[in-house]
Amino acid sequence: MKLQGKVAIVTGGAQGLGRGFAQGLLGKGVIKKVIKEFGGLDILVNNAGVNGEEPETWRRTIQINLIGMIEGTRLAETYMDKSAGGRGGLVVNIASTAGLVPMFHGPVYSGSKYGVVGYTTSMAADPKTLETGVSYATLCPAFTATELFEESHETLLNNNTGLDLAAKQITDAGIQTVADVVNGFLQLVEADDNNGFVMAVSKQKGIQYVHRRPRKPRANKL
Ligand SMILES: NC(=O)C1=CN([C@@H]2O[C@H](COP(=O)(O)OP(=O)(O)OC[C@H]3O[C@@H](n4cnc5c(N)ncnc54)[C@H](O)[C@@H]3O)[C@@H](O)[C@H]2O)C=CC1
Ligand SMILES: CC/C=C\C[C@H](O)C(=O)/C=C/C=C/C=C\C=C\[C@@H](O)C/C=C\CCC(=O)O
């Protein structure tokens, strides 16, 4: 997508990756204004997310990371839908590489992110995207130096079970910077025909397209 003059919303844009995504989009000419009434929308980045596994926090993780992302996606589609007066657009849902590979020390978080990948790629595979003009892409960062990572890491260090294995996963994957992830994010957003793309970004492996095309809808095979 060409970004000059486009209108974008980034949830959770006040800090961390969301702030990086917003700054990256502004640097590419996405317009910056206080929107008094909801005009057209070209890009939605569902970035807001939390990581909680405790009896009193795990439901909030699902509510924000998965349900909130679905609600945002469905709302954006109503504004972007060409068959309903919109001009098409792009929804980028921020999952995690914990939505591609198991993360035993965060099963609820990982489950929420597998849900983001599954939901977003399923939306991309729907033939109706040909009418709505709305594309759906998924970004899967690995460990990145932000407040969420620091807080999650602190919690991990206070748990004794499996600490060595968790520490090995972090060491193997490495801890990247927000700028590393923003670099991949901008490549994903600017890619032509990016509907269905799933991009992973990690210090260990750099930028990887896990898959580029929605799996073609198949006739239901009984
Ligand atoms: N930091 C990392 O290692 C990785 C982060 N991610 C994902 O990237 C996204 C951003 O994470 P970080 O920047 O690391 O976290 P962060 O904690 O630094 O920033 C998250 C932002 O989202 C906001 N937020 C949280 N819940 C919200 C809600 N219900 N409504 C509105 N805003 C809300 C927070 O106030 C904060 O400004 C999250 O979805 C996270 O799961 C994915 C993989 C790796
Ligand atoms: C202690 C921090 C816990 C969670 C915070 C963080 O927000 C997060 O999301 C963690 C991500 C976990 C990543 C786990 C493994 C990463 C491996 C990478 O090297 C590459 C993985 C996949 C790339 C694509 C693939 O090979 O399938």
Image (spheres, grey):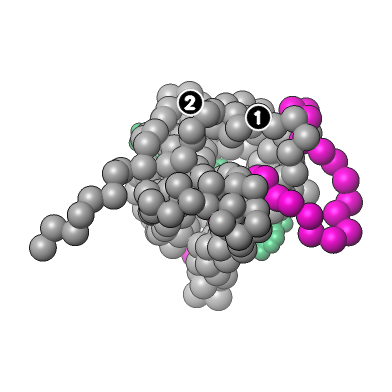
Report the amino acid beneath label 1. Lys
Please say whether residue 85 is visible from this viewpoint. yes
The x, y position of residue 182, in whole percent, is 63, 31
- Where on the picture, by quarter, is residue 8? top right
Report the amino acid beneath label 2. Ile
Is the C terminus in the top left, top right, bottom left or bottom right quadrant?
A: bottom left
Q: Which mark is residue 207?
A: 2
Please say whether residue 151 is visible from this viewpoint. no
The x, y position of residue 198, in whole percent, is 43, 38
- Label 2 near label 1: C-beta < 8 Å? no
How many numbered badges does the structure rendering display?
2
- Where on the picture, by quarter, is residue 212? top left
Is the N terminus in the top left, top right, bottom left or bottom right quadrant?
A: top right
At x 88% / y 59%, what residue is drawn?
36
- Where on the picture, by quarter, is residue 167? top left
Disc 1 crowd rating (10 Å Cα; few below 14, some 14-19, many 20+) is few
Indicate whether 64 appears above or below 81. Answer: below
At x 19% / y 59%, what residue is drawn?
220
Query: Is 169 left, or right, of 135 in this rendering?
Result: left
Q: Secondary structure at mark 2?
A: strand
The x, y position of residue 191, in whole percent, is 54, 28
Disc 1 beta carbon < 8 A from ligand 1? no
Disc 2 crowd rating (10 Å Cα; few below 14, some 14-19, many 20+) is many
32 in magenta:
yes
| Magenta highlight range | 27-53
